[in-house]
Image (cartoon, rainbow, N blue to C red):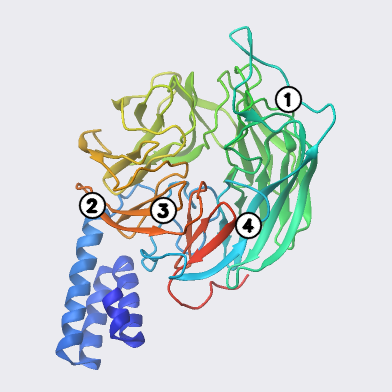
Amino acid sequence: MLLAVRLGRTVGFFCVTLSRSFIQDGKLIFAQVGRLSRSFRTPEVDRLMKTHLALSLVILASVSLAADGPAGNGSNWPRWRGAEGSGVSTESNLPSEWSDSKNILWKTPIPGRGHSSPIIWNNRIFLTTSIEGPVVPGAKAPVHMVNGQEFLHPDSVGADRKYTLKLLALDAASGKIVWERIAYDGAVYDNRHRKNTYASSTPATDGERVYTYFGSEGLYAYDFNGELVWKGDLGKIGTIGMGVGTSPVLFENLVIVQCDSEMGENSFIVAFDKKTGKQVWRAARKVLVSWATPVLARAGNRTELITNGTEFIISYDPATGKELWRTKGVDNNAIPSPVVGHGLAILSTGFPAKKVIAIRLDGKTKGDSPEIVWTYDRGTAYVPSPVLYGDYLYLTTDNGILTCLEAKTGKVVYADGRLPVPATFTASLVAYQGMILQVSEDGDAFVIAAGPKHQLVRTNSLGEPIYATPAMAGGRLYIRGDKHLYAIGAAAPAPGGQ
């Protein structure tokens, strides 16, 4: 692709069209190659086309998704980790190289702090932020009891202060903040880990409204003009002073939130009507506080909502909240989100122990008897979620060591994918164009070739800490740094209108 750009905009345009067409229809690309060769009959262009075609074949062969695997929506990125919650984009024109001065289309300061990812719908970007205010006299976190004893984590802070929790809307073409709305302003119910924020849950959108979750401080629905449509009170959700991490999931007419709390006595999962905010169903869950976001999976002739948990992994009917099946949980902190593909749901945990569990999704399982296809006991992270891309599952540790497993069997392909510099990771893995992307807390982005061999393609740096998982839409990467939101991509027409 870069070779095409160097030969000129016209040839570059045809190369982009060529890639897109090949992915959509294998026959169309050959017709285009023929037309292009006749229109630009020079040896240099012919060589370029042949090289481009060969590279496309190699990339597609290495990362083609299974028929039942996840696939990102190329034009929008409407929720945490994209349309399917997979962290995978099928776009073919995303950038692989950038710096603080290269391929940055715009850079917008974002007030406050937040680890939520941006979401994108046409020409609108939405993200949340938390602005810390003064100390509130008398405000403090609730007492947390663990195994009958009072518990206070040494890094638990925040409940003694006022916070302003906001939803921001930005113009994707310019990066300009179009509007911002205060969802909540006041003292918060519980502490957070000092690395966490009160705006770490990623919003979700259906193209009409934006749904944003702030834990005990509420669930809010706004229209695209910034008007509050409704708000929901989910009660006091204790997080043993660590803060909230799970994000809402949309299914048909519902917005669903997993609300695991404290030692599990008051944990639940709940669904609200997207238009009215009326509660449609609610299911109690006897599982410890978790931070994972559930994922929707097609299983046979039904859709299942798969939830991670310490005591239990549970599948629900997303339309009714009825439990379909359950099995033993991950036994540790349930923070990474599940991934699905190849007829499997794969769940993981990284602290204190490391564990990966692959469960058969056959659409028939009931009760407590799902088939465990394989397990693995190393290579996982405390916070970052894995990514399932093509035939391979990629795990990362907290310091970025990649493990690649065969998704269907759990067979280790490699387990020592090391980076050239020491780093710490909070953002989850994403994948696109035959590459795995890891972004570190130092602001470095490591582009790794997907496939059975660990190969560092390049390192890109923004020079700003990154905790949020990147989003991808309209030929751009959107990366939220500690202070700014970046739009990264080659100069191109802005995304489609609202």
Q: Identify the secondary structure beneath mark 2.
A: loop
N-term mark: 2 or 3: 3
> Dot 3 corresponds to which residue?
444
Q: CA distance from mark 1 to mark 4?
A: 29 Å
Tell me where residue 93 appears, x and y as whole percent: 38, 69
> Dot 2 corresponds to which residue?
455
Q: Nearer the viewer, residue 227 or 364?
A: 227
- Residue shown at 30% from the left, 26% from the top: 375
> Dot 4 corresponds to which residue?
126
- Residue shown at 59% from the left, 28% from the top: 155
N-term mark: 3 or 4: 4
N-term mark: 4 or 2: 4
The outermost residue toward the top is: 148
**Crowd band around label 3 with a 10 angstrom C-alpha radius: few (<14), some (14–19), many (20+):** many
Q: CB of mark 1 within 8 Å of CB of mark 4?
A: no
Residue 107 occupies quadrant: bottom right
Circle on res. 231: none
Disc 1 residue type (three-letter): Ala
